Amino acid sequence: MSQTFLIIGGTSGIGLALSKQLKETGHQVITASRQGNIQFDALTDSLDTSSLPEKLDGIAYCPGSINLKPFHRLTAQDFLEDFNINLVGAIKVVQAALPKLKNAEQGSVVFFSTVAVAQGMPFHASVAASKGALEGLTKSLAAELAPKIRVNCIAPSLTDTPLAAKLLASEEKKKASAERHPLKQLGSPEDIAALATFLLTSQSKWITGQIIGIDGGLSTLRS
């Protein structure tokens, strides 16, 4: 059965891969981003829901940041910007679209965190703090919105996307990053999108309130 999904940040990286996978399986996809069906910037915009259908079966909030600096170089503005992108943007989207999610038989929300929340890493203070707050939001919303709406969060390791381009700017950097993972490879947008597709659709109808790692084993294994 075809369903309708709103993908925030659906024109690049994981969001683009997710949009493609949902369309390939027969679902309707609406994207909201700077180049999407709906204009949206996580830092400056509220979500305009006037053009959305009355029913949404799911939302994936894909915008994120990779702001890696030593703690002593991070400013309050750095923390605020990461919180606005990773947490406040997600809050604005879900609040705006919640009435349309409630019109679905069972709605689903998927957020994206980072392995750096569970696995402490140097230079990740700002992004891990904001994504950690997003994980808290995931569990709170999952409890509050059950049983009508499921809410889950995916926590990837570094993935080969445009957002990570500076960190993976050469084959040497890609190889070094892959070697840090027990599976000795980088994740792809399609890897993460496959899990997001599962969580958005009724295949995962008994899963909510979960933070699910997809990180090549980095958060739990030592090779």
Image (spheres, helix red, strand yellow):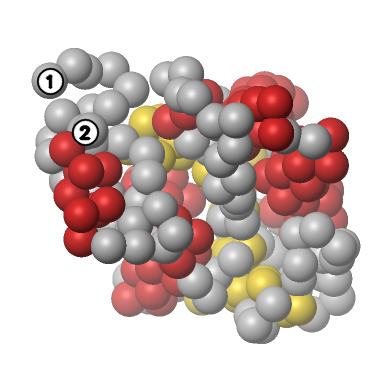
Is there any visible trace of residue 55 in the rendered image?
yes
Q: At 46% across and 24% down in the image, what residue appears?
A: 121
Q: Residue 39: x and y, percent? A: 76, 78
Q: At 31% across and 36% down in the image, what residue appears?
A: 215
For residue 30, the mark is none
* Residue nearer the viewer, 164 or 90: 164
| Quadrant assignment, res 151 | top right
The extreme front residue here reads 72
* N-terminal label among 2 and 1: 2
Task: Write down the residue under mark 1.
Answer: 223
Q: Which amino acid, by three-letter code, is at mark 2?
A: His
> Helix, strand, or loop for circle 1?
loop
Q: At 39% across and 68% down in the image, what residue appears?
A: 17
Q: Residue 181: x and y, percent? A: 21, 33
Is there any visible trace of residue 201 in the rendered image?
no
Number of other residues with Cα within 10 Å of mark 1, as a class: few under 14, some 14 to 19, many 20 or more? few
Q: Determine whether 27 is above or below 157 in the image.
A: below
Q: Residue 198: x and y, percent? A: 36, 49
Q: Determine whether 37 is above or below 220 in the image.
A: below
Labels 2 & 1 near each other (Cβ < 8 A) = yes
Instruction: Point out the image quarter for the C terminus.
Output: top left
| Quadrant assignment, res 1 | bottom left
> Helix, strand, or loop for circle 2?
loop
Left of 72 or right of it: where is 7? left
Left of 48 or right of it: where is 136? left
Q: Residue 201: x and y, percent? A: 43, 52
| Quadrant assignment, res 97 | bottom right
Q: At 26% across and 43% down in the image, what residue appears?
A: 177
Q: CA distance from mark 2 to mark 1?
A: 8 Å
* Residue nearer the viewer, 119 or 38: 119
Q: Which amino acid, by three-letter code, is at mark 1?
A: Ser
Task: Write down the residue under mark 2.
Answer: 181
